[in-house]
Image (cartoon, rainbow, N blue to C red):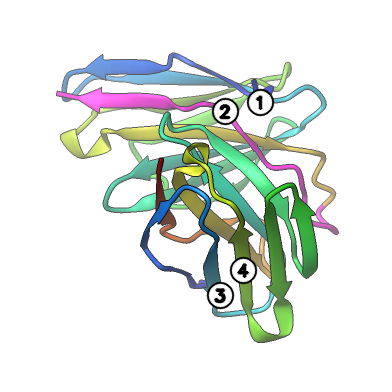
């Protein structure tokens, strides 16, 4: 099946810093989503982004499907951004079931 | 509130027992997905139902089963529980899946934390 690798696995920031999270995938995809899991375990869909660039407030995401990677940018980070960020893809020609990466654990200190 | 409701939020049970986890999808969503999240395996897809029918199967053990009812709520049954089944179990729902275009708006419930002792 499709492989999804996220980097870095862990990230510690000071409030106000910017960061870039990366998701590499091994095959062409129908769909790519970014999720945030907060410290209470809730999974929130951030972006549905099979290609191109999207922005939502301090977050933005870019997917370059031809090169099989996606980037999630967090600007002016806040303590509420802490948690785990997951990338999930479903492979072209597949069953549209997302395969999740192992995530990037982000801690933002005040 | 994501619109996807999972009950119970926490469950503690003994090895060998059977439990049922319940999920009500977001209004209008016909597809329900079950995932298991453990520390060593990450988020693993278990099974998908679409409008009452099983649509796709992932890494679901034979001791586990699921169904989706006419009112679209779904139940995940876990039997002969082992210590290793301790995990967060998530349900997600999505808008109608036509089979010719991918679904979007994948929404997760808040999960059921299962502890097997």
Image position of B90 (left or right of A69): left
What's the CA distance linking mark 3 and mark 4? 12 Å
Q: Secondary structure at mark 4?
A: strand
* Quadrant (top left, top right, bottom left, bottom right) of the N terminus of chain B: top right
Residue A24 spot, x, y in % from top left: 54, 75
Query: Could you tell me if the residues under marks 3 and 1 are in contact, i.e. CB atoms within 8 Å?
Result: no
Q: Earlier in the sequence, mark 3 or mark 4?
A: 3
Q: Which residues are magenta?
A: B99-117
Q: Residue under circle 3?
A: A25
Could you classify mark 3 by the number of other residues whose Cα lies within 10 Å: few (under 14), some (14-19), or many (20 or more)?
many
Q: Residue under circle 2?
A: B109
In the displayed structure, would residue B54 be above or below residue B99? above
**Disc number for residue B2:** 1
Q: Chain of mark 4?
A: A
Instruction: Give me the residue at 22% from left, 17% from top.
Output: B13
Q: Earlier in the sequence, mark 2 or mark 1?
A: 1
What's the CA distance linking mark 4 and mark 1? 25 Å
Query: Could you tell me if the residues under marks 4 and 1 are in contact, i.e. CB atoms within 8 Å?
Result: no
Q: Secondary structure at mark 3?
A: strand
Instruction: Give me the residue at 20% from left, 25% from top.
Output: B116
Could you classify mark 2 by the number of other residues whose Cα lies within 10 Å: few (under 14), some (14-19), or many (20 or more)?
many
Are tags 2 and 1 found on a single chain? Answer: yes
Query: Could you tell me if the residues under marks 2 and 1 are in contact, i.e. CB atoms within 8 Å?
Result: yes
Q: Main secondary structure of the magenta part?
A: loop
């Amino acid at each position: 099946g499709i492989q999804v690798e996220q980097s870095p696995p862990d990230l510690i920031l000071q409030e106000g810093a910017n960061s870039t999270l990366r998701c590499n995938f091994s095959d062409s995809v129908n769909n790519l989503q970014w999720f945030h899991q907060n410290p209470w375990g809730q999974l929130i869909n951030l972006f549905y982004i099979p290609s191109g660039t999207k922005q939502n407030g301090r977050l933005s995401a870019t997917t370059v499907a031809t090169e099989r990677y996606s980037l999630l940018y967090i600007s002016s980070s806040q303590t509420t951004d802490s948690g785990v960020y997951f990338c999930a893809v479903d492979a072209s020609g597949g069953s549209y079931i997302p395969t999740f990466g192992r995530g990037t654990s982000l801690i933002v200190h005040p | 509130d994501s619109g996807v409701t999972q009950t119970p939020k926490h469950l503690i049970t003994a090895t060998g027992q059977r439990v049922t986890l319940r999920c009500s999808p977001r209004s209008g969503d016909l597809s329900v997905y079950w995932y298991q999240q453990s520390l060593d395996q990450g988020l693993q897809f278990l099974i998908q139902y679409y409008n009452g029918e099983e649509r796709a199967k992932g890494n679901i053990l034979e001791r586990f089963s699921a169904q989706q009812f006419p009112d679209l709520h779904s139940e995940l049954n876990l039997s002969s529980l082992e210590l290793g089944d301790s995990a967060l179990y998530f349900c997600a729902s999505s808008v109608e899946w036509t089979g010719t275009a991918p679904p979007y708006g994948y929404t997760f419930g808040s999960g059921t934390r299962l502890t097997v002792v």
